[in-house]
Amino acid sequence: MAIKRGSKVNQSFSASSMTDLMFLLLLFMIIATTLINPNAVKLMLPKSANQLKDKAVTTVSIKDAGNGRYIYYVELENVGSREGVARALKSRLEGQEKPTVSLHADKTVAWDEIVQMMNIAKDNGYGLIAATQP
């Protein structure tokens, strides 16, 4: 007595849905990785509780003198210009290993001036801490 099956099982496999899932995962990963690493300036910002990893070796202060002019200080010495800041920092921090500079800027100082000070620190290999009020 031969028993026959009424329906046969189709053994083929369709990978189209798997391809769609892989494409969506790839698209998600591409978008997610571009959002993780934005182009930004890295700063070490001190917490208001004064818990810093690095102690600043010297300070740079920028004060607004009005009419787009600024007064630059290294420690408490008026150095006159951005170039004066670079010269004063080089002379004070020469020979030190991983020197750190604390940047104190008035609220009315333009971002351009702050970024210029960041560039001076970066070009000379100094660490930079942006000082804030507690």
Image (cartoon, grey):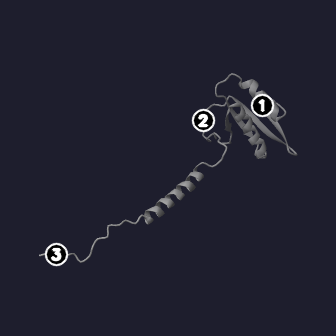
Q: Amino acid at mark 1?
A: Ala
Compared with 6, 107 (above or below) is: above
| Residue at the spot of label 1 | 86
Residue 61 in the image, given as x and y percentages of width and height: 76, 36
Disc number placed over residue 52 in the picture, else none? 2
Q: Amino acid at mark 3?
A: Ile
| Residue at the spot of label 3 | 3
Q: How many marks?
A: 3
Q: Amino acid at mark 2?
A: Leu
Q: Residues under labels 1 and 2: Cα distance?
A: 24 Å
Q: Residue at x 56, y 54 (%)?
A: 30
Badge 3 crowding class, 10 Å Cα cut-off, few under 14, some 14 to 19, many 20 or more, is: few
Disc nearer the start of the sequence (3/1): 3
Foreground mark, 1 or 2?
1
Residue 10 in the image, given as x and y percentages of width and height: 32, 70
Q: Is label 1 in contact with label 2 (beta carbons under 8 Å)?
A: no
Disc number placed over residue 95 in the picture, else none? none
Can you say which quadrant of the picture contains the C terminus?
top right
Badge 2 crowding class, 10 Å Cα cut-off, few under 14, some 14 to 19, many 20 or more, is: few
Compared with 26, 14 (above or below) is: below
Disc nearer the start of the sequence (1/2): 2
Residue farthest to the left? 1
Q: Residue at x 53, y 54 (%)?
A: 29
Q: Residues under labels 3 and 1: Cα distance?
A: 95 Å
